[in-house]
Amino acid sequence: DTGVSQDPRHKITKRGQNVTFRCDPISEHNRLYWYRQTLGQGPEFLTYFQNEAQLEKSRLLSDRFSAERPKGSFSTLEIQRTEQGDSAMYLCASRPGSANTGELFFGEGSRLTVL
Amino acid sequence: DAKTTQPNSMESNEEEPVHLPCNHSTISGTDYIHWYRQLPSQGPEYVIHGLTSNVNNRMASLAIAEDRKSSTLILHRATLRDAAVYYCILRAIIQGAQKLVFGQGTRLTINP
């Protein structure tokens, strides 16, 4: 499968714990996005990488959230001291930099439940 | 980001055409119109996009009004697998993230 891969698909944690999600974009896609989606809502933009540089962050990304893309390939999203309000689906998407169609390729998401 | 307005839900029957409307009265000349859909328990999936002219692909057709203030996604012959939330999104042709800003979309139900 050559699509966007996310791991883990499901994570249940207790409030106050740290969690980390990983995203492997489509090979050679240098643009990578993280979104968050709560039940019944559309996805909300969190952050954007071009290669290894994090170029844009939403105000939704509080200081408990950190995202990295150290070598410009896979990315991680860490949430520290999780709260019940962090329960959501975390979606990763990628696209090539050269194409201007704007088509984003999404992974299937990582669902977080904070108890 | 320019805003789109879509009905919360629509219902149609299998093997019939479906017309999903979208209003975007504040669209600017540099905004593309994108449609994505999200099936249950999956990430969003690209459907189609256009700028000014009507567009067709294997999944759907996109009809864009002459003043570009509205558009319609057309599924020519709906199947049960087309049941999903459909998002109409405007994307600016500018440098930078070119991120997609999703609204709440239209939940499409297909009756057998």
Image (tube, helix red, strand yellow):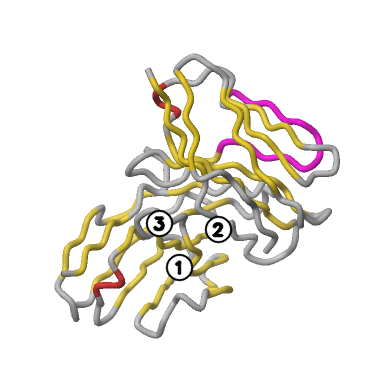
Residue at position x 62%, y 50% from top?
Answer: B5
Does B29 sit left or right of A42 as displayed? Answer: right
Residue A91 shows which numbered tag? Answer: 3
Circle 3 residues within 10 Å: few <14, some 14–19, many ≥20 = many
Placement of the N terminus of chain A among the 4 image quadrants: top left
Q: Check disc 1: other Cα within 10 Å, few if <14, some if 14-19, many if 20+.
A: few
| Residue at mark 3: chain | A
Q: Which chain carries label 1?
A: A
Tag 1 or tag 2, which sits nearer the N-term? 2
Q: Which residue lies furthest to the bottom in this view?
A: A63
Label 1: which secondary element: loop
B59 horizontally vs B44: left or right: right
What residue is drawn where x is 43% and y is 56%?
A41
On screen, residue B53 versus residue B14, left or right, reads: right
Residue A71: which numbered mark, if any?
A: 1
Task: Name the residue type under label 3.
Answer: Leu
User: Could you say where residue B104 lies in the image, as x and y percent from the top left?
Assistant: 50, 52
Residues in magenta, as a range: B47-58
- Residue A9 in picture, x, y percent from top left: 26, 52
Q: Where is residue B44 in the image (x, y as percent from the top left)?
A: 46, 45
Closer to viewer: mark 1 or mark 3: 3
Residue A11 in picture, x, y percent from top left: 20, 60
Q: Residue A30 has which mark?
A: 2
* Mark 2 on the same chain as mark 1: yes
Q: Is B6 on the left or on the right of B109, as rendered?
A: right
